Image: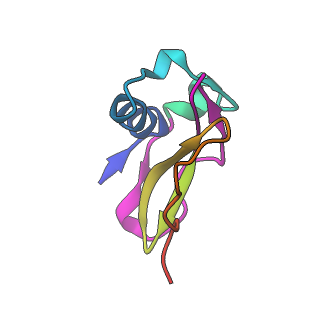
């Protein structure tokens, strides 16, 4: 499946009640829109970190699948599940 970090970040932000436009990110616009095929089992897209007022977003990959992980930006009582596999 072909995707971009912008698409995956937009979905992750939406799930947290945010939007891509609210994020400060290390991605350039070209890097955010670079397409990659997540089904190839290769790391797609460039590494990044993105911040909103409430969350920090980062790339997650396991067994060819790509997604965006997010953790609260500020200390809180939210527990983070393991990222990746193994």
Residue at image location 52% in from the left, 56% down from the top:
79
| Relative vertical location of residue 22 with respect to residue 43 in this rendering, above or below | above
Image quarter where the N terminus lies is: bottom left
Query: Quick one: 15 or 77, which is closer to the camera?
Result: 77
Q: Is residue 19 magenta?
A: no
User: Dividing the picture into quarters, in which one does residue 12 lie?
Assistant: top left
Residue at image location 42% in from the left, 20% down from the top:
19
Give the total of numbered labels.
0
Position of residue 14 measured from the top left corner of the image (x, y, whole percent): 35, 29
User: Dividing the picture into quarters, in which one does residue 76 lie?
Assistant: top right
User: What's the colour scheme?
Assistant: rainbow
Query: Quick one: 45 or 13, which is closer to the camera?
Result: 13
Residue at image location 56% in from the left, 48% down from the top:
77
Q: Which residues are magenta?
A: 34-57
Question: Going by the picture, which residue comes out furthest to the front?
Answer: 77
Question: Going by the picture, which residue comes out furthest to the bottom?
Answer: 86
Query: Quick one: 70 or 8, which is closer to the camera?
Result: 70
Position of residue 43 measured from the top left corner of the image (x, y, whole percent): 55, 62
Residue at image location 48% in from the left, 77% down from the top:
85
Position of residue 36 measured from the top left corner of the image (x, y, whole percent): 45, 50
Question: Going by the picture, which residue comes out furthest to the left?
Answer: 1
Q: Going by the image, does 15 lie left or right of 61? A: left
Q: Going by the image, does 44 lie left or right of 2? A: right
Position of residue 13 measured from the top left corner of the image (x, y, whole percent): 42, 31
């Amino acid at each position: 499946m072909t995707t971009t970090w912008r698409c995956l970040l937009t979905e992750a932000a939406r799930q947290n009640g945010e939007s891509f436009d609210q994020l400060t990110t290390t991605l350039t616009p070209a890097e955010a829109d670079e397409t990659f095929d997540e089904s190839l089992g290769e790391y797609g897209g460039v590494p990044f970190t993105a911040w909103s007022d409430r969350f920090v977003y980062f790339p997650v990959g396991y067994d060819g699948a790509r997604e965006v992980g997010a953790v609260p930006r500020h200390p809180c009582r939210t527990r983070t599940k393991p990222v990746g596999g193994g």
